[in-house]
Amino acid sequence: MNKPVFTVEEIKRKIEHYCVYQDRCHKEVEEKLKEYRLIPEASEHILLHLLEHNFLNEERFAKSFARGKFRIKKWGKERIVRELKFRDISAYNIKSALKEIDEQEYIKTLYELVEKKNTSVSETNHFKRKKKIADYLLYRGFESNLIYEALKNY
């Protein structure tokens, strides 16, 4: 089955729509462009157009990614950093993205997750129970020093 053939302008419109629908990072857009099997010059032309017209903005992507993953998925900073690095986001943009997370809200969320996990863990041994909660929070990407501070009360 042959894939439909598009002009560079049609692909440019499709990629614009792809970027407007949700903030994207360079890596995601480059992967999407590869699907169209363009010559390198055409890909460069489209990427340049997206950057010039602000369809593609790595700092904006990093900030909205950090806010979303923290607020919706309740991820910790370490997990957010790891995911942003995986997407080849610069250290500067990662740093500015982490500033989007309010410190008090971050700590409050950590304590809420400790509370929630504490009620769902059925382990009766006190130390094993704490370990299960700590492992859960480490997986979520919270910093170990904050986790152990939060678990002192349990």
Image (cartoon, rainbow, N blue to C red):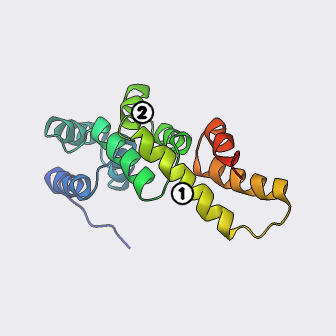
Residue that protrudes farthest toward the front in the picture: 153
Mark-to-mark CA distance, 1 and 2: 25 Å
Q: Position of residue 106 (x, y in %)?
A: 47, 45
Q: Amino acid at mark 2?
A: Ile
* Helix, strand or loop at mark 2: helix
Which residue does the image show at 38% across and 73% down from the upper left? Answer: 1
> Of the residues under marks 1 and 2, which one precedes in the sequence?
2
Residue that protrudes farthest toward the right in the picture: 125
Tell whether 54 sits left or right of 25. Answer: left
Q: Position of residue 80 (x, y in %)?
A: 49, 44
All told, the count of numbered labels is 2
In the foreground, 125 or 27:
125
Tell whether 132 sits left or right of 106. Answer: right
Give the residue at mark 2.
Answer: 94
Q: What is the quadrant of residue 56 in the picture?
A: top left
Give the residue at mark 1.
Answer: 112
Q: What is the quadrant of residue 50 in the picture?
A: top left
Q: Position of residue 76 (x, y in %)?
A: 53, 46
Which residue does the image show at 39% across and 43% down from the upper left? Answer: 27
Residue that protrudes farthest toward the bottom in the picture: 1
Q: Residues within 10 Å of mark 2 (few under 14, many from 20)?
A: many
In the foreground, 59 or 13:
59
In the foreground, 64 or 84:
64
Q: Amino acid at mark 1?
A: Glu
Which residue does the image show at 26% across and 36% down from the upper left? Answer: 44
